[in-house]
Image (tube, rainbow, N blue to C red):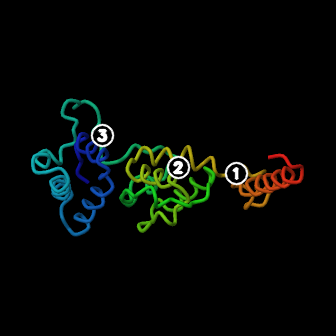
Amino acid sequence: MAKTRAEHKKMLIERGQWAEFVAYRSSLVVGGMAAAKANKAAVEKFLGEEAAESAGEDGSRNNKKGPKEDVDRPKIKANEDPGLISSVPKPPPPVARDAFDGKPPCGEIRNIKWVADNMRIVDVHPEDCPSMRAWNLLCECRENTYFRSNFWKDHYGKTIPAKSTLDDADASEIDGTPTLALLKKIRKASEKAQKLSGVD
């Protein structure tokens, strides 16, 4: 497939349009357009005519000795799934703070799992989201390829318990829910004891 100049790719990533650009260009190729023409048409649609004039160049004019770099591909490590990194829906639209009023507090593991579950779901809504933090995390993951890659590598990986933990505990106990329930019981017992002793 034709190359996209490095600066074009950088601009598209910064605007949060890289995945949409790649999908549009691919649809043109699937529709029968030559790869170079599809690339130029996609660049013109997303970045304008001036940028399209240089589309199809690989950006390596000043480095003729080295191999051409395929700048269309995000830099993906061997242990990362390109499908998880390069194409997700656009971020959901901004919402008002009151969309999250009345939500009970939830732990970070629940937030991270919710984002992981909804990364590629098109019709996410604030009422389905456990917290503002989870909503913002989802938006950032969809907006920024590198943030999304780090999410899968650094955040989501930490939610997966060790095998020994799974062997010793029911999976429902791993997200901290029993701890919150225990804290509520302790608080109620404390309040009851204070009432019985007459301490305010």
Q: Circle 1: is it few (<14), some (14-19), or many (20+) Cα within 10 Å?
A: few
Q: Residue at x 79, y 46 (%)?
A: 200
Q: Does the rendering let one see residue 184?
A: yes
Disc 1 target residue: 161
The amino acid type, in three-letter code, at marker 3 is Glu
The amino acid type, in three-letter code, at marker 1 is Pro
Q: Residue at x 25, y 43 (%)?
A: 11
Q: What is the C-alpha distance between the residues marked 1 and 2? A: 15 Å
Horizontal arrangement in the rendering, residue 76 relative to residue 62 (left or right)? right
Query: Which mark, by number, is residue 119?
Result: none
Instruction: Find numbered disc 3 in the image and state the secondary structure of the residue it sits on.
Output: loop
Q: Is 194 or 96 nearer to us in this picture?
A: 194
Q: What is the C-alpha distance between the residues marked 3 and 2? A: 26 Å
Q: Is 195 or 66 nearer to us in this picture?
A: 195
Disc 2 target residue: 152
**62 up-or-down from 68: above or below:** above
Q: Is 174 or 93 nearer to us in this picture?
A: 93
